[in-house]
Amino acid sequence: MSMKKKVILGIIVLLILAGAVIAVSIINKQKEANQPEESSSSIVLKNLWKNEREDMESIDLKTETDLITLIPNGYNSTGTMLWVIKGHEDWHLINTYQNIVTMAALLPAYKLIEEDVTDPDRLAEFGLLDPTSILTVHFKDGTEKICYVGILSSDKEYTFCRIEGDNSVYATNADYAKFSSFTKNSIRLRTITEINNTSGTLMYVFVQKKGGIATEISKDTSIDVNNKPADGMMYPTTNCLFKQPYSNPIIQVGTDLEYNYLQYLTTPEIVETIDADCQDFTPYGLGDEPEYHEKIITRTGDTDDNYEYVTTDYYFGYTYGDSNQYIYFREGDSNLVLGVDVSCMANRQFEPFFFVNKLIYINSVTNVESGYIITGDTTHTFQMKRSDIPEGGTAEDRLYSYRINDELIEDETFQALYRSMIELIPSYEIRGEAPEYDENDKVELYYKFWDGTDLTLTFYRLNEFYYVIQMEDDVWFACDDERFDRMLERLSEADQAIGN
């Protein structure tokens, strides 16, 4: 190919590339006409109007289904004007809506989309031919300002709007698109019974996740955890008892639920009213089988003659929102469906195992007469000797001595061993079909009590990290192998102490 032809060909290629760049640029500009730049979201181009709060008499909000008149009603602690619904001055607004109305006093615009838009078809593209809502601010001097609110931008970051007397289309706050769905009932702040988690005594808990196992716990006030039990009784660490799902008395409720569970619960924060008189809860996940159900009863008061019960009966349904930041909510048998902030679910628990005292077997050493520990081919026996109750004394005044394999051992050494035996803490539970374990690799603990009863606990090797123990027909607890290593160390120390 000659040099001349090569030059001509090169020029043609450059022209084609230039044309392509220009075409792409034109297309992008056409797209941007309806799409504000993402980087502009934090930049206020200008406030479309700036109204002095003291000069504002009322705000009319015409929505798809309602005409709401809002009037000022004082200020909050930060100096922000508060608004109430005219004719319902005793109602409060949901904070989210209160903030949106407050922003309307300035009407911030993030970008000028297009100037002098009068063509009906073009207005329709922005949702401004038939506005989704109309905001009218009335002033004390008799004047007014009007804002027409359109639709969300395609990325849902902005709402298109224009103001009376200005044909320009602006991008403003995305929340303004919510104006269209406002009704007097939907923006009203409803009340939810608040969780009493600071001064109350926990009396009852029921929690269940859809498809999961229900957990039910009640307090038995006849159990006094401050007094040691009579001989032979299992040592009570709490007077809260499982009603379901566990029936084995060895499985106890975790101690101090007020501190470990109740104090971390929060009352849901209402963000919107979904349906003020719902007749079908199924679409929200709040029907006969809600996604989550939590019922808690606490008792307040210092004496038996001065107390009251506070019950919170919460139902939580499906999450919703662009980032699933909200969750449908219903209280008790109310027909009111609310949207609440999903953050309230952060510390709520719905698995039974969470409420279990992780010390599998709790019993005071003073209740044990004798027993043994079998690990592999080795058996260690232990015995407790106790004196009679001294005249005029109590069971606490007994004197005890301890033996390992019939050899006397110091109290501290034996008690350290006993603690390691009752600190075989489970990490998780297995339900349903029995796990595959090695029945030849096991650890067996046997206790005989002073009242003549006895108990055997058998742990089987599950894998290199865990042992398992069957707690009920379909419930197994998996226990960390390190706990067994610690118990073997205490046994080794006991052997050394008696010269084995």
Image (cartoon, grey):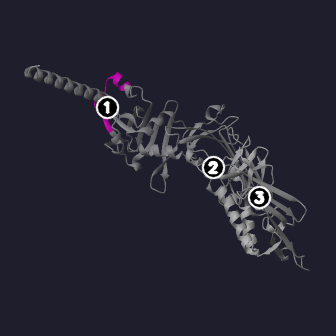
Q: CA distance from mark 3 to mark 2?
A: 45 Å
> Disc 3 residue type?
Asp
Q: Which residue is mark 2?
A: 348
Q: Which residue is mark 1?
A: 32
Q: Is residue 118 left or right of residue 18?
A: right
Q: Which residue is mark 3?
A: 377
Residue toward you, 163 or 292: 292
Q: Secondary structure at mark 1?
A: helix
Q: Tell me which residue sits at (49%, 42%) in the image.
A: 70
Q: Quadrant of residue 408?
A: bottom right
Give the class, few, some or many, for how many residues have Cα within 10 Å of label 3's Cα (few <14, many ≥20): few
Q: Quadrant of residue 491?
A: bottom right
Give the class, few, some or many, for how many residues have Cα within 10 Å of label 2's Cα (few <14, many ≥20): some
Sequence-earlier tag: 1 or 2: 1
Q: Tell me which residue sits at (63%, 47%) in the image.
A: 192
Q: Which residues are magenta?
A: 111-124
Q: CA distance from mark 1 to mark 2?
A: 44 Å
Sequence-earlier tag: 3 or 2: 2
Q: Tell me which residue sits at (38%, 33%) in the image.
A: 160
Picture coordinates of residue 368 (x, y %)?
Answer: 83, 66
Query: In the image, is residue 425 above or below residue 177?
Result: below
Instruction: Tell which tag, 1 or 3, sits nearer the viewer.
Output: 3
Residue toward you, 223 or 361: 361
> Disc 1 residue type?
Glu
- Residues under numbered marks 1 and 3 in contact, where contact means CB atoms less than 8 Å apart: no
Residue toward you, 39 or 138: 39
Seen as rendered, the residue at the extreme bottom is 391
Picture coordinates of residue 390 (x, y %)?
Answer: 89, 79
Q: Is residue 395 left or right of residue 307?
A: right
